[in-house]
Amino acid sequence: MHKKRQPKDDIIDGVERKLRVGLGRQQQLLESGLTTLASIGSVAPYIGLFGTVWGIMNAFLGLSQTEQATLASVAPGIAEALIATAMGLFAAIPAVLAYNHFTAKSSQLYDSRALFCDEMTGMLQRETSVSVQTPISKETQVNAGQVTGL
């Protein structure tokens, strides 16, 4: 754009647009798996709860088929319910921790890349403002000196 004698503002706007598009694409790539982690972290406890309810229902069904209620008749269903709860938590807790970790890292990377884009744009603005200025001719310098009394 500079070689085609485009205005300075158009050059800077074009670079800013290109940097924003690149930044957005990279951020989308980084965050692509986060929705899966969030889904696992939010759904797994409910699946564990469903397994708990199922296990307790089985325990009560087993209890209804016996004439005498004993711990031995209820224990297998309760153990099954507790295993389902533990499995739901076993899946959910690491998923939530990983989601929080990767979200924080993604945010840090985005901030550092956005800072780079701002620095790059600032450098470009300084560079284009220096290269766009035309050198002052000797005749203009002489006339300026005469006006100020030098």
Image (spheres, helix red, strand yellow):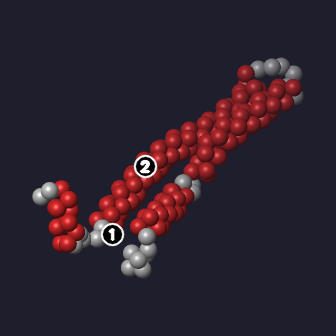
On residue 110, which mark appears? Answer: none
Q: Is residue 87 visible?
A: no
Quadrant for residue 67, please give it. Answer: top right
Side of 35 where 10 appears, left or right: left
Q: Residue extending furthest bottom?
A: 4
Give the image location of residue 89, x and y in percent.
Answer: 61, 37
Name which residue lies at 34% across and 66% down: 128
Name which residue lies at 31% across and 61% down: 126
What element does badge 2 sit on?
A: helix
Give the image location of residue 79, x and y in percent.
Answer: 68, 31
Judging depth in this view, the residue of 65 and 53 nearest the camera is 53
Q: Amino acid under label 1?
A: Val
Side of 144 where 30 appears, left or right: right
Please give the count of numbered marks on the rendered protein: 2
What element does badge 1 sit on?
A: helix
Q: Residues within 10 Å of mark 2 (few under 14, many from 20)?
A: few
Question: Which residue is tagged 1?
Answer: 132
Judging depth in this view, the residue of 6 and 47 nearest the camera is 6
Name which residue lies at 81% across and 31% down: 57
Q: CA distance from mark 1 to mark 2?
A: 31 Å
Q: Residues within 10 Å of mark 1 (few under 14, many from 20)?
A: few
Q: Amino acid under label 2?
A: Asp
Judging depth in this view, the residue of 14 and 111 nearest the camera is 14
Quadrant for residue 76, please give it. Answer: top right
Name which residue lies at 33% across and 64% down: 129
- Quick one: label 1 or label 2, which is nearer the N terminus? 2
On residue 111, which mark appears? Answer: 2
Side of 21 where 76 appears, left or right: right
Whether label 1 touches label 2, CB < 8 Å: no
- Residue 38 position (above or below residue 14): above
